[in-house]
Amino acid sequence: MRKWIAYCWLVALTLISAPAMAQETEYQFGVRWSVNGLASSIDIQDIMLNFSGTPSNLDTRLPASQYIKNGKNTVKLYTWPLEYEADHELRVSLLYWEPGQNPNTEASTAFEVVMMPGVEDAKPEIVSTDPDAPLQPLQNDIRFSRDEDNDTLEVNFNNRQPMPTWCWEEGDVLNDNDATRDSLTREYRRLHALFAAGDNDALLAAASTRTKELALASGTPEAYVRDRFSYNMYFDNPDIYQLDSFPEEPMTLNLGADNRVAWLTTQGVSVPIVFSHVGTEHGASFVRSYFIRRDGQWEICR
């Protein structure tokens, strides 16, 4: 959702213990990526973190501890230009920092990968590696591929630091079919009705798993996380934010994290729950949630 980026860097402070999870981590992790003049999107474990649908100059970082698992992990940076210029550059870095450090200024780079897609016969290059970092690139498992719809810089790496088992690892394996889509649509409708009723408490209760795990990953109290995710800003300002009607046409089912995470989209990356900004032509805030299904119930995981 729109507030997510601001929230994550505000709360990326000291890690606290959480007995309910498997164990706490020593370092916290982040991902940094940059493009120059390209439309782009970035995923971890095939879960979308950020999307920029217009050609842009980006140099962005986000916390990623809550998406990093034990062993092998995958980051994918997507681009879709009409054609590349010789100076176009894709850059992906994995970051780590100690509890108490400021991730904006004190994070260390575990490794960095650069791809120059406009240069003939170019291949992704690991331009720096910290051998002591807990995250290490898989040298023979980094690739750039060109497809009809988009191009992909895929960066696989190994995490040597023990991590909690996250909800997106524990959900049921989902089938990519109409039955799954229709079941998830009913859950979106239920949440849309809560938004229409302005029921902030019920919405936060529906996302209790997300709250617990983001509190663990960021090292902040659960109460703070709940406050950061409060929807009262929308409900208290109806002259600014107007909830759109729920889409009537069938939506697209998207699956990530080895088919354990699901979300619906309407057109492109638009989602079913949207607040339009009154008085603007295209301004909108998207409620972008990711779900797992566990014990037969849909659960907001991220």
Image (tube, grey):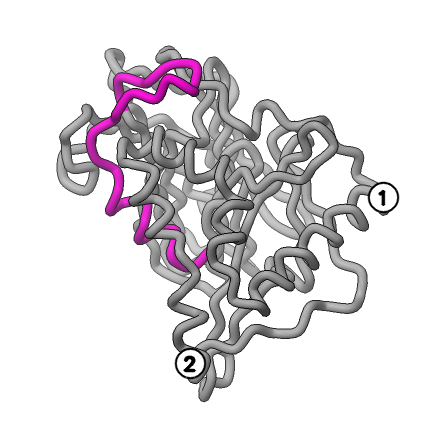
User: Dot 1 corresponds to which residue?
Assistant: 179
**261 versus 156 height, above or below:** below
Q: Position of residue 7 (x, y in %)?
A: 32, 49
User: Is there any visible trace of residue 121 in the rendered image?
Assistant: no
Query: Left or right: where does residue 179 sit relative to residue 65?
Result: right
Report, in whole angstroms, how far the alpha carbon at label 2 lies from the one at label 1: 36 Å
Q: Residues within 10 Å of mark 1 (few under 14, many from 20)?
A: few
Q: Is residue 3 magenta?
A: yes
Q: Amino acid at mark 1?
A: Ala
Residue depicted at 60% across the width and 31% down the height: 257
Q: Secondary structure at mark 1?
A: helix
Q: Residue at x 36, y 43 (%)?
A: 33
Q: Tell me which residue sits at (47%, 58%) in the image.
A: 200
Tag of residue 240: 2
Percent from the top left, x then y, of residue 170?
A: 60, 23
SS under mark 2: loop
Which residues are the magenta region? 1-27
Q: Amino acid at mark 2?
A: Ile
- What secondary structure prevails in the magenta region? loop
Q: Position of residue 2 (x, y in %)?
A: 42, 59
Please state which of residues 244 and 221 is positioned toward the viewer in this rendering. Answer: 221
